Amino acid sequence: MLQYIDIQNLANRATWDEGRYYQKHRQESMSSLRQAVHLVGRPEQFLVVGVGNANDLDLPELVGMAPKVWLADIDRASVERALTRQGLQKSSQEGEHEAVRQDFQERLRVWIGDAGGSAQEIDDFLRAVSPQLSLQQMERLTVLTEALRRLAKRAEDYRLDADEAQVPEPGLPSTGFDLVVSQCVLSQILWPVTQAVWETAGIPWQEGQAKLVRGAQESLYPELARALHSLALGHLAWVEKRLRPGGMLVINTDVSWQGVPLYGTDVEAALANMPPSQGRKWAALQLSGPKEWEWHLDEATRALVRSYRIKKASL
Ligand SMILES: C[S@@+](CC[C@H](N)C(=O)[O-])C[C@H]1O[C@@H](n2cnc3c(N)ncnc32)[C@H](O)[C@@H]1O
């Protein structure tokens, strides 16, 4: 069984040489970042999560945008390769990495880890559902439903614990960033879970996604919807917590593939459907009208990307 990190690593390896398809997406992504930097006004430090291969990011430009720029991802190998490819560091034969310029050395920080994506919880879920192919359809649905309930509960607990305890991530400031960017991470967190559900239940992807979006009430769908909602909020809570009061969040996320909505990536809906017990903190976030663009991932695949800009209230 592939683990969450292996799935991300494989996806990054598969898209490493696909830069030609990223031009428009990169232009739009960088434009969303420039606007946010302009609105924040001379950020002291900012954080970009989901750097990966950086096909959609101009890393030298990013590093010039603030005295401290943190680049983060769960997949170390892709970030190291991207930094080398974009000329920010050189790599020795022994696998050591060294910044090519003194100012890059001073400004650039790399953090590798899970940005509130409940990777451990998703791994446990994948393990619980993967050996089920030998079971009858009804039994599989029961196992899936139970595993989804557990995943939703664990993702919720994780978020609440992290909120209360202000859990520090080793090596990363726990808060204080002027700007935090989530670069197409949300759909990546949700994808391994939906994919495992469709495969195990034998439901075609398009059909399953369409029913999820319509709010189907038959067994499996409400549980999957709740799990995806909890996972999405876990990531949003993680990035939000890193912002200083008055700081800005940019969430760039693919929201549909081939015209099929990706359930759980609608940030506006996620914030609007917040449980009342947690609504207060989130109500202090102001979301400004999202922008959208098309991204052709290859000749055959078309995604719609939405860019949300969210301001955290000042104290
Ligand atoms: C679709 S890619 C973004 C595109 C990327 N900027 C590029 O041009 O290659 C999503 C990135 O998010 C990273 N990612 C996925 N889940 C993550 C998590 N839970 N925490 C941190 N990074 C994650 C993946 O490793 C991947 O590099």
Image (cartoon, helix red, strand yellow):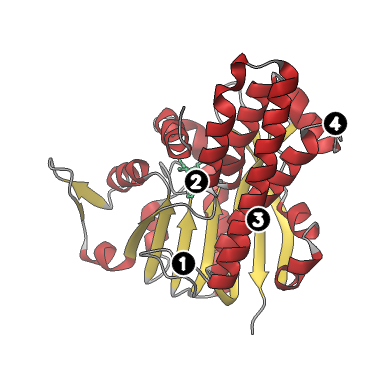
User: Quarter holding the C terminus?
Assistant: bottom right
Asked if ligand 1 lies within 8 A of label 1, the reply is no
Q: Position of residue 290 (x, y in %)?
A: 71, 55
CA–CA distance in space, label 3 to label 4 = 23 Å
Name the image quarter holding residue 208.
top right
Q: Which residue is mark 4?
A: 218
Mark nearest the camera among 1 and 4 is 4
CA–CA distance in space, label 2 to label 4 = 28 Å
CA–CA distance in space, label 2 to label 3 = 13 Å
Mark nearest the camera among 3 and 1 is 3
What is the number of the mark on residue 152?
A: none
Which of 246/206 is in front? 206
Up the image or down, 313 lies above or below 223; here it is below
Up the image or down, 167 lies above or below 33; here it is below
Is label 3 in a helix, a strand or a loop? helix
Q: Which residue is mark 3?
A: 156
What amino acid is labelled 1 in the image? Answer: Phe
Q: Residues within 10 Å of mark 2 (few under 14, many from 20)?
A: some
Q: Residues within 10 Å of mark 1 (few under 14, many from 20)?
A: many
Is label 2 in a helix, a strand or a loop? helix
Q: Position of residue 219 (x, y in %)?
A: 81, 31
CA–CA distance in space, label 3 to label 1 = 27 Å
Q: Which residue is mark 1?
A: 46
What amino acid is labelled 4 in the image? Answer: Glu
Q: Position of residue 123 (x, y in %)?
A: 51, 39
Which of 62/77 is in front? 77
Q: Residues within 10 Å of mark 3 (few under 14, many from 20)?
A: many
